[in-house]
Image (cartoon, rainbow, N blue to C red):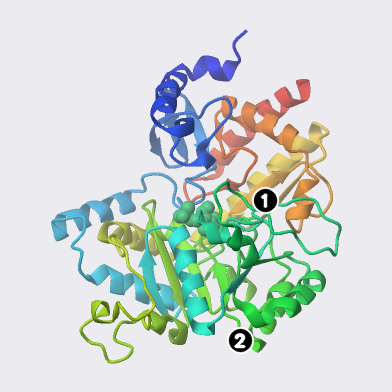
Amino acid sequence: PVHPLLEKTRRSADLYEEAAHWMPGGITANIKHFHPYPVFMHSASGAWLYDVDGNDYLDYNLCYGALMLGHGHSRVMEAVQKQLEQMGTPIFGTPHRLEVEMAKKLAGLIPGVEAVRFTNSGTEATLFALRLARAWSGKGKVAKFEGHYHGGYDRVLVSVTAEKRRKGMPPKVLPDSLGLPEEIQEQTVVLPFNDWETAEPILDRHHKELGAVILEPVQAGFIPPDPEFLQKLREYTASHGIPLIFDEVKTGFRMGLSGAQGRYGVTPDLTALGKVLGGGFPVGAVGGCREIMELASPVRSGDILGGDQKAKGADVLFHSGTYNGHPTVLAAGLATIGILEEEGVFAEVERTTYKLRRGMEEVLRRADFSVQTVGEGTIFNLIFDDQPVRDAQDLLRSDVALRRRLDHYLLEKGIYLKPVNRFSLSTSHKDAEVAETLTRFEAGVNQLKKG
Ligand code: PMP
């Protein structure tokens, strides 16, 4: 018999067959791979996705967390239309008013941000932040954390996936892709998250060569930091002259308006942003203290004619991009932030998130599964394990095969997720959507139990 999911997604199967001919794996990003094939969507509204076969799904992927207002919020759609009409073009390729407005907005909301540069993705944001940090410190090595993701380029594609190690042992530097140059591993120091006792001696061994320390303040958006851990890292990096970078691509405008840094009261030197900031359009930004950010200014040494005059000598820090500060993107982002700034909006999404978490835990407990939700604010994950989850090592204990099977049933029942991954909520996920989700969830869990 054909599995019910395959039965109801035949048009996706057909499209996938064609897609696989023209694009490796039939997808444009490896994370979009879904066994046995991904579902192709046709339209979306609020908390809902509709596929090419006419099935509906409650969306908890939300474009990997980017859609904090859900799909097609009227004020975001209007802001985009207005930008296109009023400016008469998607992009001038020159400075414009919205850049200034957004830069001021970020500086006003996020503690570590005094000045800003825009990019087109979170990947570019962390790349530029690392370059700024190395330029300021004059040192080349980068320390990152086991299990932390910062984008898809060579320098940070190490030890995003973790291998089991004995507690107290330093994490290994493991490549996450084919084709990485070997030097990358020599240039990178990997630290354990939430484990200062193990992290500090590693930092002591390398601090003289470290040009930057980068981390996700909330690992993968759902494993909260021990606030003392963040504090110790802040003190250590400050006292050794190493710029500390918070990658808030995922946590920015999700852990509240001031990011994880506001939530935990620890201020980094540089902050990478993305996702929610673009209101559904491609975006990234780097913000930070003026002293470091100003390294990117071509007028720094009185060169008022601009960067080209200096391009031959490397006394200017390079940062460019055809689409940086795209007006359509910033219009969508400003509209999004405007809504999130309204009284009680964040608190309401957090409230529905907790309601959903508690509801799911109850359903799973009734079905006798050993499971927990782990998360913070508007993001959480379901972990089939009952021990505390504080880092990538703890995640290795959980029953991923069981979770994969559950996700398959959830998709069939109409709950859309990145497999074996987080749930993200939006302002469009109201009590009615949570109730409908729990009904579908229970049906999925019951099927899992039947085996
Ligand atoms: N950093 C973090 C913490 C992220 O979650 C992501 C995206 N998942 C990135 C960087 C990369 O951002 P992008 O996909 O926009 O390049």
Task: State the image coordinates of residue 445 (x, y, percent, origin top left).
Answer: 71, 29
Q: Is residue 449 left or right of residue 266?
A: right
> Quadrant location of the N terminus?
top right
Question: Looking at the image, can residue 111 be seen?
Answer: no
Looking at the image, which is closer to me, 317 or 150? 317
Query: Does 322 sit above or below residue 404?
Result: below
Mark 2 = which residue?
241
What is the CA distance from the residue labelled 1 to the residue labelled 2?
Answer: 29 Å
* Helix, strand or loop status at disc 1: loop
Identify the residue at the far top of this view.
Answer: 1
Mark 1 = which residue?
161
Query: Does 287 sit above or below residue 164?
Result: below
Seen at 78% across and 67% down, the residue is 195
Question: Looking at the image, can residue 247 be seen?
Answer: yes
Seen at 71% across and 23% down, the residue is 447
Looking at the image, which is closer to me, 263 or 153? 153
- At label 2, counting other C-alpha atoms closer than 10 Å, the crowd grade (few under 14, some 14-19, many 20 or more) is some
- Label 1, ligand 1: CB separation under 8 Å: no
Quadrant in which residue 402 is drawn = top right
Q: Is residue 184 left or right of residue 45?
A: right
Task: State the image coordinates of residue 399 (x, y, percent, origin top left).
Answer: 77, 38
Q: Amino acid at mark 1?
A: Thr
* Helix, strand or loop status at disc 2: loop
Q: How many marks?
A: 2
Seen at 44% across and 47% down, the residue is 70
Is tag 1's residue or tag 2's residue first in the polypeptide sequence? 1
